[in-house]
Image (cartoon, rainbow, N blue to C red):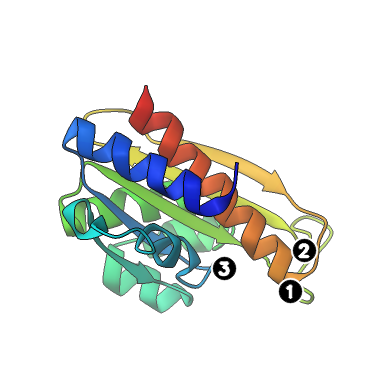
C-alpha cells in the first residue's frame, strides 16, 4: 500500500466516523502531520500537531510530567503515553498520536539503542495504546518507518 493511498484511507475512515486527529512528534519532526495533510480536504479532520523535540517542549506544550521524563526518559512508553494524552487534551481531538524515539545515527545506548521508537495512540474514552519498535535503518529510514507505523495505527483505530 503506497503512502498517499494509506493517508487517503485514513482520511476517509476519520470522516466516516466524524473523528478529528492531532499529533505530538519528537523523532519524526512533523513527518506524520505532513503526510496526513498531504490529502486534499484534510482540514476536515486534522486539528493540528506539535513537534516536541526537547523535554522542555514536551512539558510546556503538552504537559508531560517532569517526573515521567526523569523516571523513564524521553524515549519510553510512559513518555509516549503522556505525549499522546497531553496533545489529545490540548486539541480536544478524538484521536491523538505521539512518537518519541532515537532516529540516529547517534544518541543510542545499550539500554536504548538507535532505532528504538515508541508510538502512542490516545482515543477519547479508551485506554491509550503504546507500541514499541526497533528499526535497523539510518536516520531517514527510521523516521519514515516510524511515520508508516504511526499511520497504520491511526488507520486500524479509525476503521475498527
Residue 115 drawn at (x, y percent): 74, 59
Answer with mark 1 or mark 2, whichever residue precedes in sequence.
Answer: 1
Residue 159 drawn at (x, y percent): 37, 27
Q: Residue at x 49, y 46 (%)?
A: 5
Question: In this rendering, does residue 77 appear at all?
Answer: no
Q: Is 126 left or right of 145, judged from the image as shown?
A: left
Q: Is 74 left or right of 36, judged from the image as shown?
A: right
Residue 79 drawn at (x, y percent): 47, 54
Could you say which disc has been placed on residue 27 in the image?
3
Say few, some or many: other residues with alpha carbon within 10 Å of mark 1 (under 14 / 14 to 19 / 20 or more): few
Mark 2 and mark 1 in contact (Cβ < 8 Å)? Answer: yes
Answer with mark 2 or mark 3, whichever residue precedes in sequence.
Answer: 3
**Residue at which label 1 appears:** 107
Residue 147 drawn at (x, y percent): 55, 56
80 vs 50, nearest the viewer: 50
Image height of 66 relative to 10, above or below: below
**Residue at which label 2 appears:** 114
Amino acid at each position: 500500500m503506497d503512502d498517499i493511498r494509506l493517508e487517503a484511507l485514513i482520511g476517509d475512515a476519520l470522516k466516516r466516523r466524524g473523528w478529528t486527529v492531532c499529533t505530538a512528534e519528537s523523532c519524526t519532526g512533523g513527518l506524520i502531520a505532513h503526510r496526513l495533510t498531504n490529502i486534499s480536504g484534510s482540514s476536515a479532520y486534522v486539528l493540528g500537531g506539535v513537534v516536541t523535540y526537547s523535554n522542555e517542549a514536551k512539558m510546556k506544550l503538552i504537559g508531560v510530567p517532569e517526573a515521567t521524563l526523569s523516571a523513564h526518559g524521553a524515549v519510553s512508553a510512559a513518555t509516549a503515553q503522556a505525549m499522546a494524552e497531553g496533545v489529545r487534551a490540548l486539541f480536544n481531538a478524538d484521536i491523538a498520536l505521539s512518537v518519541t524515539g532515537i532516529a540516529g545515527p547517534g544518541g543510542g545506548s545499550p539500554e536504548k539503542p538507535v532505532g528504538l521508537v515508541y508510538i502512542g495512540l490516545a482515543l477519547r474514552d479508551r485506554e491509550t495504546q503504546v507500541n514499541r519498535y526497533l528499526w535497523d535503518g539510518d536516520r531517514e529510514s527510521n523516521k519514515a518507518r516510524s511515520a508508516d507505523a504511526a499511520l497504520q495505527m491511526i488507520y486500524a483505530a479509525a476503521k475498527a
